[in-house]
Structure formats: C-alpha cells, structure tokens
Amino acid sequence: MKQIHRRILMSLGGVLVGAVAVGIFKIAALGVDPFQSLMSGLDKLIPIPFGTLYMIVNAVLLLFSLVFNRHNIGIATFINLFLLGYVTQFSYELLQKFIVDPSMPVRFLCLAVGIVIICISAALYMTADLGVSTYDSIAITMADKWKWGKFKYIRIGTDLACVALGVLCFLLGGGTWADVPTFAGIGTIITAFFMGPLIEFFRVKIALPLLGK
C-alpha cells in the first residue's frame, strides 16, 4: 500500500475512533476533553442535533484557518468536520442501549477506556499529518504564526476558555451546576494532563509502525 493511502486511512480511522471515544466519555459522564465541553454546553443551549451542531461550529472555526493559516487545512480537517459529530452522536445513542444507568465503577471504566481510545485516535490522526482539526488550528496559529507564546501555554488558555464558555452555555440552556461535572469534571482534568504522554506512547508503538517507521 502506498504511503499516502496509509496516511489517509490513518486519518479516517483516527477521526472515527476518536468520535467513538467521545461517545464513551459521554456514557461515563465524568467530564470530556475541553473542546467537547464547549460542544456539550452549546448542545444544551441550541436545540438541534449534535452532529449538525458540531459541523456548524467547526465550519465557523474553519473560516479562521482559511483567513489566517491555510497550511493547517488538509483531508483530516474535512473528515473531522463532516464525520466526527455524527459518529459521536450515533456511538453515544448506541452505547446507551447497552449501558443503561451505569454504576460508578462502570462509569470510571468507561472513562479509562475512553481516554485510551482517544489517545490512540489522536496518535493516528497526528502522525498521518494530513491536516488538523479546526480547533487545533487556533492554538497552532497563535503559537507558530503570530508568535504569541509557546503552544502548550496557549493551548491551556484556549482549553480553559472552551470549558468556561461551555459551562456558561450549559447554564444559559437551563442546565444546573450539579450536572456540570458530567462534561467538565475529572475526565477533563485527566485528559488535560495525561493525553500528551499517552499520545506519544501510542504514536511510537502503533502509528509510526503503521507507516513503516
């Protein structure tokens, strides 16, 4: 198989597997990654299907890349734009049929599985190097093109902004503070601190060997 074909399959597989992971995070209800925290808040506020909402939000963010940093746009960008939201919605609804009213141990197990899967998906997606998500492009542009600071610090800032805005939208949509930890909780903290090392581990052990490196 040609290298470009492998990279395309890795991008597609990474995005789809990542969408399933987000569905598992939702079942765990212990917090999701920062961008999904924002999407959870918007989902509560705006009464349209999650898949459609996800595509609209990413289409708006795509304009940012088109204006400021087109280098970040690739095949993976559009796979993420058109598929991730709908696959997440489908995965979550399917999982709800099999995991009904999960106990706390089951929720923590789902959280652990979700973290591992989303890190594998990110390793595949990033190693393929065929574009980044519209959200990732914002911090990359601020760091690499505008030179506002180091990427890791800017990413912390954009992540915090996502979580804060997500919580605000959730509350404005009629949600309660008691329900906030289901999408902005311990899972959000864990992904912020442990995704980086896990992604690197799976990049070395899985993604690079798939490319023959």
Image: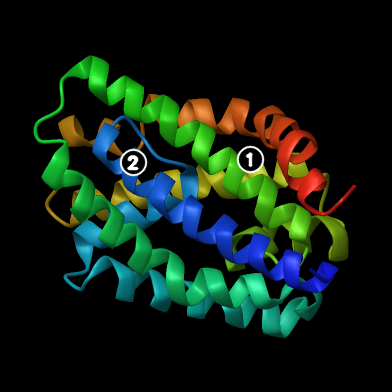
Please tell me which residue lies in front, 100 or 140.
100
Q: Residue at x 40, y 40 (%)?
A: 32
Tell which residue pokes out farthest to the front in this image.
Answer: 1
Please tell me which residue lies in front, 80 or 151.
80
* Three-letter code, disc 2: Ile
N-term mark: 1 or 2 = 2
Q: Residue at x 66, y 56 (%)?
A: 125
Left or right of 183, for residue 8: right
Q: Which residue is mark 2?
A: 24
Q: CA distance from mark 1 to mark 2?
A: 24 Å
* Three-letter code, disc 1: Ile
Q: Answer with the quarter of the image where residue 139 lies.
A: bottom right
Q: Residues within 10 Å of mark 1 (few under 14, many from 20)?
A: some
Q: Residue at x 36, y 63 (%)?
A: 87
Please tell me which residue lies in front, 52 or 147.
52
Q: Secondary structure at mark 1?
A: helix
Left or right of 7, for residue 13: left
Q: Which residue is mark 1?
A: 156
Q: Residues within 10 Å of mark 2 (few under 14, many from 20)?
A: many
Q: Quadrant of the N terminus?
A: bottom right
Q: Nearer the viewer, mark 1 or mark 2?
A: 2
x, y percentage for residue 190? 51, 25
Left or right of 100, for residue 191: right
Q: Residue at x 44, y 71 (%)?
A: 83
x, y percentage for residue 51? 32, 70
x, y percentage for residue 150? 83, 44
- Give the answer, above or below, for where 79 lies relative to 167: below
Q: Secondary structure at mark 2?
A: helix
- Give the answer, above or below, for where 103 lies relative to 6: above
Total number of numbered labels?
2
x, y percentage for residue 7? 75, 65
